[in-house]
Amino acid sequence: MYTIKSYVFPESLEEADELLHRDCRNNAVLGGCCWLKLGRRRIRWAIDLTRLGLDQIEVKDGFLELGACITLRQLETHPAVTARFDGLLGESVSHIVGVPFRNCATVGGSVFSRFGFSDLTCALLALDASVVLYRGGEVPLAEFMASPIAFDDILLKVRIKDDGRRAAYQSVRRSATDFPTLAVAVSCLDGRWKVSVGARPGRAVQAEEAARCLNDGRGPEAAGVAAGAELTFGTDLRAGADYRKKLAAVLVRRAAQTCIERENKG
Amino acid sequence: MKVKITVNGMLYNKHIPNDMMLLEFLRKYGYVSVKRGCDTSNCGLCTVWVEGKPVLSCSYPAARADGKNVTTLEGVKDEAASFGRYMTAQGVEQCGYCSPGFIMAALAMRRELTNPTEEEVAHYLAGNLCRCSGYAGQTRALRAWLHDKPWEKEGQV
Ligand SMILES: Cc1cc2nc3c(=O)[nH]c(=O)nc-3n(C[C@H](O)[C@H](O)[C@H](O)COP(=O)(O)OP(=O)(O)OC[C@H]3O[C@@H](n4cnc5c(N)ncnc54)[C@H](O)[C@@H]3O)c2cc1C
Ligand code: FES
Ligand code: FES
């Protein structure tokens, strides 16, 4: 459990940033606190963002924008999110612990942390999302995912082009609410595909070769095999690397098939 | 820090430690229906409502509840007792430690979902663990309760 010396609700983003930068190592931005509280950080200034209007879901200038303080549950229930991308975002988080948990955990905490097991970052990668940081500005999620975590910026929102792409999600879990053993998201727009694979158990990455297979019409089966071959997989207590590789082939195939069926249904 | 938290309609104007969790705040002021289980956001035993939404009080900073309405099982005790009778009829409880969190989640579910399917019910309540039972009794109790809708006759919201 963490300890907190001063708990603040900053009144502006400038103030939040200023507080964080007084001492990035010892100050912390609070998301839903579900993960943060499990650690033993001795927090000097705990910066609560919940009064800064970052809890908005907006469709603006051709983008779906998700504020950092949006909860995972809102991704499952908000019509602007559920009506887009075949409900991919809601579906991706729907197995995370339970509803009371998902009413706490946030988009900001989930994306900023770049967990290897993250269902949400896997889904967002397949949508080619970007993150908006207070200092760093807008950064493609793929680039953000590949960068090391420095607790020196504030994630303000996630932006996704509202381009009507079709999408599908697949994950395997050892029990209903466990962390994913492997997660896969795919999306397709005008015959151009994106495939991402997470919980490898490393961070989610895009499977470029698998996407090329689908772009070239070689089909879901070939895409699955390509994803298994091009990515690296590791072993942890949930599964071995070989099993994950085989799983990736199956889940990419299934997700791509689902996406094609959705496309055909219109 | 200073907070004003309303619990079951009663306002608490208190100084609290900055790192206090809502669970600790509620138990300190006598809401002992709120149970600490895993304390790691896994089990759902500590479920209460903040502004009508079920949350895990073990992971919800008490400071964040400043200015908010919190509901515990004590605040919905008639409806909880009514649902509890369905649980008793099905022999759901063994140690009973998971019941307050489970009931708070179930009552939130019936406010949120209209005529949920059995699959939707199981999905909604998946985060409320019970280590004694195999969930069969809970499933039967929920089925009967959702079928009878006693809250309509008993005038609950
Ligand atoms: C028991 C348990 C099971 C889980 N299972 C899964 C699972 O199956 N799948 C899955 O995908 N995820 C899972 N998670 C992770 C969860 O979904 C959240 O991603 C996690 O709790 C972090 O979100 P949070 O809002 O609670 O952030 P916090 O715990 O508050 O913060 C996490 C980190 O992010 C920083 N942070 C928070 N918000 C911001 C911001 N806006 N800008 C900059 N930094 C920020 C904090 O300083 C902290 O370092 C699980 C977590 C727990 C505790
Ligand atoms: S005690 Fe809060 S989730 Fe277990
Ligand atoms: S009855 Fe014992 S944990 Fe549920």
Image (cartoon, rainbow, N blue to C red):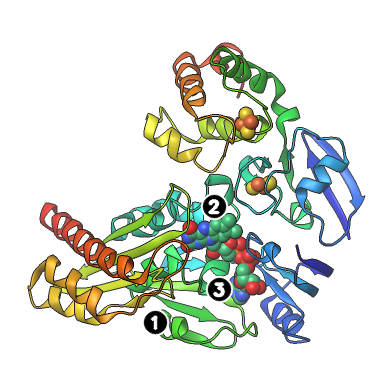
Query: For mark 2, what is the residue?
Result: A102
Chain under disc 2: A
> Mark 1, chain letter?
A
User: Which is more N-terminal, label 2 or label 1?
Assistant: 2
Give the crowd class for mark 2: few <14, some 14-19, many >=20 residues within 10 Å.
many
Q: Which residue is mark 1?
A: A142
Question: Which amino acid does the dot numbered 3 rest on?
Answer: Ser
Badge 3 marks a residue whose secondary structure is helix
Q: CA distance from mark 2 to mark 3?
A: 16 Å
Mark 1 neighbour class, 10 Å CA radius: few under 14, some 14 to 19, many 20 or more? some
Task: Please tell me which residue lies in front, A158 or B37.
Answer: B37
Residue that appears at 35% across and 56% down: A172
Query: Assess mark 1: CB under 8 A from ligand 1?
Result: no
Q: Report whether A128 appears left or right of A190.
A: right
Residue drawn at (62%, 19%) of the image:
B84
Query: In the rendered structure, which disc, 1 or 3, sits on the residue that comes first in sequence?
Result: 3
Counting from the top left corner in percent of width and height, residue A144 is at 46, 83
Which residue is at 59% across, 31% downward? B132
Per the model, the C-alpha gap separating discs 1 and 3 is 14 Å
Tell me: is circle 3 under 8 Å from ligand 1: yes
Q: Which quarter of the picture shows residue A142?
A: bottom left
- x and y percent of residue A193 in the render? 20, 73
Helix, strand or loop at disc 2? helix
Q: Pick out the residue farthest to the right.
A: B15
Residue A190 in the image: above or below residue A250: below
Q: Amino acid at mark 1?
A: Ala
Query: In the image, what residue type sits under mark 2?
Result: Arg
For the C terminus of chain B, which image quadrant? Answer: top right
Task: Look at mark 3 in the image and give the residue it sits on.
Answer: A113
Q: Is residue A189 visible?
A: no
Residue B145 as seen in the image, left or right of residue A30:
left
